[in-house]
Amino acid sequence: MNLEVKWLEDFLAFAATRNFSKAAARRFVTQPAFSRRIQSLERAVGVTLVERGRSPFDLTPDGQLFLITARNVVEQLSDALQHLHGLDPASIQLLEFAVAHSLAFNFFPQWLKRLQVVVGEVSTRMTAMNVGEATHALREGRCDLMLAYHDPLGSLQLDNRYFPSLRMGTTEMLPVCAVNTQNQPLFALDALEEQEVPLLAYTQGAFLERSLQILLRQKPVGLQLRTVYETAMAEGLKGMALEGQGVAWVPRLSIERELAENKLVVCGGERWTIPLEIRLYRCTLVHKPSVERLWQRLASDAAQVEVKV
């Protein structure tokens, strides 16, 4: 059976919505017609792409792999048609960035400015996500590049052969808290006496939580940390720390102003600091000319783009 391009576009619509009705509406066809076209695609490729035995619907493992191929084929065909009509795809292609929340507002703008000095003007679209969502977006080809903290524990499970990365900057997580009326820290991690300190923690499974837990396993016996609040967002922990609710480990780049204004202070010595490396990831299974050119340039000039915060 011949494979039709419209079936690939149908499949991309389903992958974006995980819903047959919504995907059919996007493709301006009825749901029964849309379902038949997805079934035709599955017969053409010889594998089941959609897991229909669960709710909500999802892609099968074969479907997740085929998604990258489908998106690649559709984008390359679009580029070829634009070229035939006298349009330069490179001039109109957006670079889609998935960026970790804590990097989206405090790192990405200045990094992008430095990037443009090196490679010239770049058209971008940035979506702030948690690291897990951004990783899925990269794997499925829903973004061109991912900007996130380096994962020394390998929990992201990104194979470097297919998802190479380049270092784009460094920062560190600092233990911070608000100050009292004498401008002294409300809490002190290095106090000599036994104490209980309220901890503003990352939720279990949050990316930054893993590194923090490794550090806290080495805390002194006399220091008791009692979790009083949890969130996956560094900005959320910063807000609670500003209100005097406890100690939070927050990336320096997220609290530079608060530190300068003495609204937050570092409440522990050097041993409580967690170094963080910021990396840019791509997927080599997707071939997009603008991404290829940018990556080649960065591979040779990455040091000029690096930001230390």
Image (cartoon, rainbow, N blue to C red):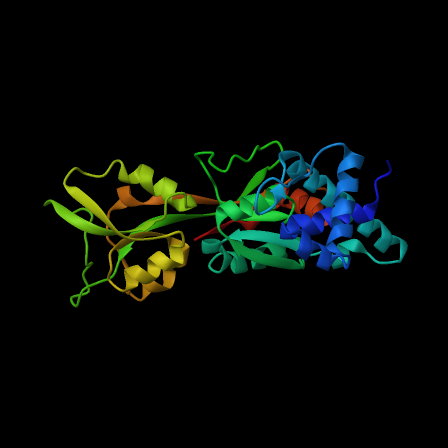
Question: x, y percentage for residue 299?
Answer: 62, 41
* Residue 143 drawn above or below residue 299: below
Of the pair 253 and 71, the residue shown nearer to us: 71
What residue lies at 29% left-to-right and 63% top-to-bottom? 242
Q: Is residue 307 left or right of residue 4?
A: left
Q: Quadrant of the N terminus?
A: top right
Q: Position of residue 288 (x, y in %)?
A: 72, 46
197, 35: nearer the viewer: 35
Visible residue check, residue 76: no
Query: Looking at the image, which residue is at 53% across and 48% down?
Result: 133
- The image quadrant that residue 301 belongs to is top right
Q: Is residue 76 left or right of residue 183?
A: right
Side (left or right) of 291 relative to 223: right
Q: Is residue 177 left or right of residue 163?
A: left
Q: Nearer the viewer, residue 7 or 271?
A: 7
- At x 74%, y 43%, the residue is 70
Rendered residue at 49%/60% (across/down): 105
96 vs 212: above or below? below
- Image spot of residue 254 (x, y percent): 40, 58
